Amino acid sequence: MSLTKNEILNFSEFCKNNNYFIPTDQLKVFFEYKNLKNLKNLEKELLYLYFLIPKNREDQIHLKNLINRYFNHSIENNDSTSYSLLSEYSNDDSDLHKIISDLNAGNYENFDTLVKSVIENFGDIDFSRPVSNDYWLNQIKKSFKYQETMMLFSNYEFDEVSSITNLINKNKFNDLLDMKILEILSEERNKAKDSYQPSELEPKTQLGELDFLYTDPNERRILLEQTYKLGNKLAIKFKRHIKQASKGKLHFRKTIRKSMQTGGIFQKIIMRPKLLRKPNLVIACDISGSMALYSLFGITLLFGMVSRFSSIKAFVFIDGLTDVTKTLKKLKKNEIDSVLHNWNSYVKSDGHSDYEKSFQDLIDQNKKLNSTTKSLIVIGDGRNNYRNISEELINNLYNQFEKIYWMNPEKKKYWNTGDSQIKKFERITKTTSEVRNYNQLRDFVNNIDFKKMLK
Amino acid sequence: MKINDLTIDGLEQENYFATQELIDVVNAAIFLDKPLLIEGPAGTGKTFLAKTLSALLNLELIRLQCHEGIDEDKSVYEWNYKKQLLSIQKSEENENLFDEKYLIKRPILTALTTEENSLFLIDEIDRSDEEFEALLLEVLAENQVTIPEFGTIKGSENRITILTSNSTRELSDALRRRCIYYYLDFPSIEIETKVFMNSIEDIDENEARKYASLVSFIRSLSLNKIPSLIESVEWVKYNNSKDQESVRSNLGILLKDKSDQKKYVEKLEESNEFNQE
């Protein structure tokens, strides 16, 4: 089986519908290679399609998912699938040793019978109940047989290295067991021809389009890392703009080199380019309860920027403003959530968000420092807990900051409902965007025009 | 350059353990005569791959180490002003001062003009400035360099180019477009086991596998500085030779950050508690 041109074109169309564009010249390289090497194997072809077309890690992951969805074929699985056979297991001729060596050899028969016995032991499962397979899985997990199976791993005495290996083995085995149980359950359910469609069989959405709120810890780790990089990128984008060809300090080495042309006489003096002015930017992030997980991503973005640039000021606010620039600078990448752990220390009065007071603080602070900062990025939902926001504040804010960019993590259809007062701010902001997932965040960062911002 | 396809076994003879995917991509890059851009965290064997290839295929290794502020003078060519000055004073005739004998070749020009088969390694491209990337575009795409006083120098065809990057900054799309891209991640347990068995004396497979899964577990904790392959090899080597009782000692070889060490010890205690249950 081999890929034809038509199939590739269809796939390219499919990618286009999913926000990924395959450049024509890269596709040309792929066909060139395919013809020269005379590739006939679908697996190899998909592998090269994956390696020759995307040019950075983000795109690579995206394309991998798309190939997985379109051709139903997964590539580059770096996760190690085999188990470590510890010497402790083999001591007393145990079941575990047999099971694991069978699994390593790719022999799943014994494992399948084990899983079936676990399910049968649980008793009859009533599929007419409108609950998902996950529910039944959790019920089975509580059963005695399941617990007994998992206890296989804890009957030994280990030294420290082996104990970690055992833990890894156990987790891997646990995942495999759960997956197999779910598989059998859904098979049984299909036999019963129940119309109920369990949610875990639906394809997962792209990581970039996944709502921050619904991420699991693993996905969150990947996304937070990317968000941190995005913060760096935003800071660098800033720096590049202000780096202008103005004269700074003497460039000694180049001047000497140049003087060699004229026999050692300094005719032309070469200067290093100078940083014209430091970027003055204020970012404020709402960390009140209604922001939920979004504030973690907000703070990661702040951290990414602050760690790159000294003159960016970062604030968090609930019912009053706190400067966290110095706090963030002392932190390391994996300690960011400690800001949220100290949530109490940022509460000024009652712990419900108060935009009026927070922005008043911001304006006062800016006036006190006689700052020339004119740009402000706000991450917040504009929900003021039924407190008033006065026209005066809006005007003052606009006088103080001419360029305001607003990220709102709330769904657009809920804006201006209930206690949301986003429309008051929308009047004075340059852009107000809904930012609920990584792709929206990336677009927001990419669309900020720094040329206009610094004027 | 016409070279037979590389295989896993071939690279293993040179003590480099790779996945089939990496070898496929290297083969494709050599076959298509395109530069290969390898990105990934520090200490996963990006530079070592280039060294291995040059040893395996008998190529001359020309290395350009990038750093902040690298420019044309340091990377492509420079005119030898002293020699030019001397030659003006010596000869009376109007000699051409921009001749090849006054040219000092830097790595890029050396790589282009060398007669032998060569491997050109541009190391840590992400440390250079944006402007330097633009300079590389002509070399990578057209295989030539233009010197204003001298003309265009066309490069020879017998060359493999490898770029490495730690992704501390985003490379431009123009550069990426001209390369073949591979993301080299930390090795899987299988590969690390092979590395341990290869580079450490008297360690059996079971032991190596145990250590490899321990190291992969450590990497999966969210650390500030993830231990590289070399560090893990050194650590296992030391632990194995001294017959240490506890894996908590000598942590400084593996983890070089205080909070990382603390985190690791905490996790160890957790797993011990689990095993005692």
Image (cartoon, coloured by chain):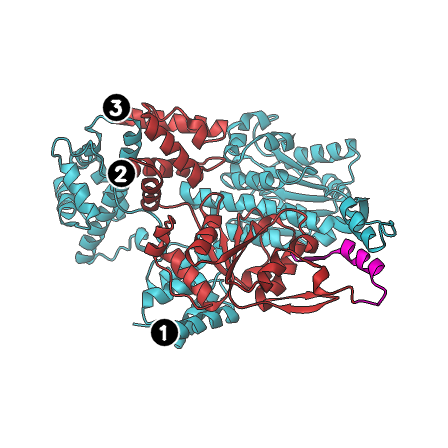
Kindly identify which residue carries mark 1: A38
The chain whose colour is red is B
Is A446 placed left or right of B1 in the picture?
right
Residue at 68 percent across and 48 percent down: it is: B69
- Quarter in which the N terminus of chain A is drawn: bottom left
Question: CB atoms at circles 3 and 1 under 8 Å apart?
Answer: no
Kindly identify which residue carries mark 2: A169
Mark 2 on the same chain as mark 3: no
Q: Amino acid at mark 1?
A: Asn
Q: Amino acid at mark 3?
A: Gln
Q: Nearer the viewer, residue A231 or A285?
A: A231
Question: What x and y, as percent, mark residue A63?
Answer: 43, 60
Disc 3 secondary structure class: helix
Tell me where residue A31 sits by quadrant.
Answer: bottom left
Q: Nearer the viewer, mark 2 or mark 1?
A: 1
Mark 1: few, some, or many residues within 10 Å (few <14, many ≥20)? Answer: few
Question: CB atoms at circles 2 and 3 under 8 Å apart?
Answer: no
Mark 3: few, some, or many residues within 10 Å (few <14, many ≥20)? Answer: few
**Res. B181 mark:** none
Is B116 placed left or right of A375 in the picture?
left
Q: Chain of mark 2?
A: A
The span shown in magenta is B76-95
Residue at 18 percent across and 43 percent down: it is: A101
Mark 2: few, some, or many residues within 10 Å (few <14, many ≥20)? Answer: many
Disc 1 secondary structure class: loop
Mark 3 on the same chain as mark 1: no
Real-space Cα separation, disc 3 to disc 1, in angstroms:
58 Å
Query: From what the image shows, is residue A145 above or below residue B179?
Result: above
**Res. B276 mark:** 3
The answer to whether residue A283 shows anywhere in this view is yes
- For chain A, the rendered hue is cyan
